Amino acid sequence: MFYALVFYLSISLSASTDATMKKPIARSLLPLQKKTIVIRNSAINKEVMNIHCSSTESDLGLKHIPYFQDYTFHFRVNWKGTTKFRCHVTWRGGGDHWFTVFKRGRDKCSECVWQVYGEGGYGDKPLMYYNRGDEGYHLFDWD
């Protein structure tokens, strides 16, 4: 097991391009990669958003995000690649909701940005997600 981990880490730290394809290697899929999550309060009702995010390894505590402000946190994907962060969101007149802000396999970003709109949000979905630096976005419902 130890040798497999050392081999895996040596590959992940090697050159960042494939010599035959000349394309970047998808490093964001590898365990131990640093990730940044940005959550923006874009609530339709412009209220302060209360958010409590956690994973099986970390509990980030309760945060209060004023309207159109961001909350940012950083972490590394665990060595098994099973890191998953979920957040519990509440605000006055906005209900009580859960959503998954990072799940390896779904999120291939190094900086994942979430805009929380709430009910009646962008495209009738309460959440918008995009990878900073990439074009396009994805709309999500609550968990």
Image (cartoon, rainbow, N blue to C red):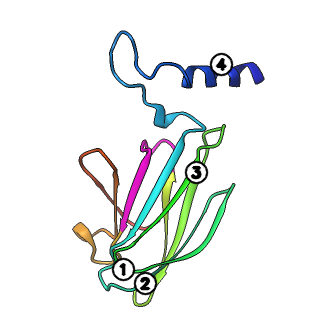
- The residue tagged 2 is 48
Calculate the distance from the C-alpha at mark 3 to the C-alpha at mark 2.
Answer: 25 Å
Q: Secondary structure at mark 4?
A: helix
Q: Which is more N-terminal, label 2 or label 3?
A: 2
Q: Which is more N-terminal, label 3 or label 1?
A: 1
Q: Which mark is residue 7?
A: 4
**Residue 1 shows in the view:** no
Verify whether residue 31 appears in magenta: no
Q: Which is more N-terminal, label 3 or label 4?
A: 4
Calculate the distance from the C-alpha at mark 1 to the C-alpha at mark 2.
Answer: 6 Å
- The residue tagged 1 is 67
Is there CB contact under 8 Å for labels 1 and 2?
yes
- The residue tagged 3 is 75
Which amino acid type is marked by label 3? Phe
Other residues around mark 2 within 10 Å, as few (<14) / some (14–19) / many (≥20): some
* x and y, in percent, of residue 116 in the image: 37, 70
Is there CB contact under 8 Å for labels 1 and 3?
no
Is there CB contact under 8 Å for labels 2 and 4?
no
- The image quarter containing residue 142 is bottom left
Q: Which is more N-terminal, label 4 or label 2?
A: 4
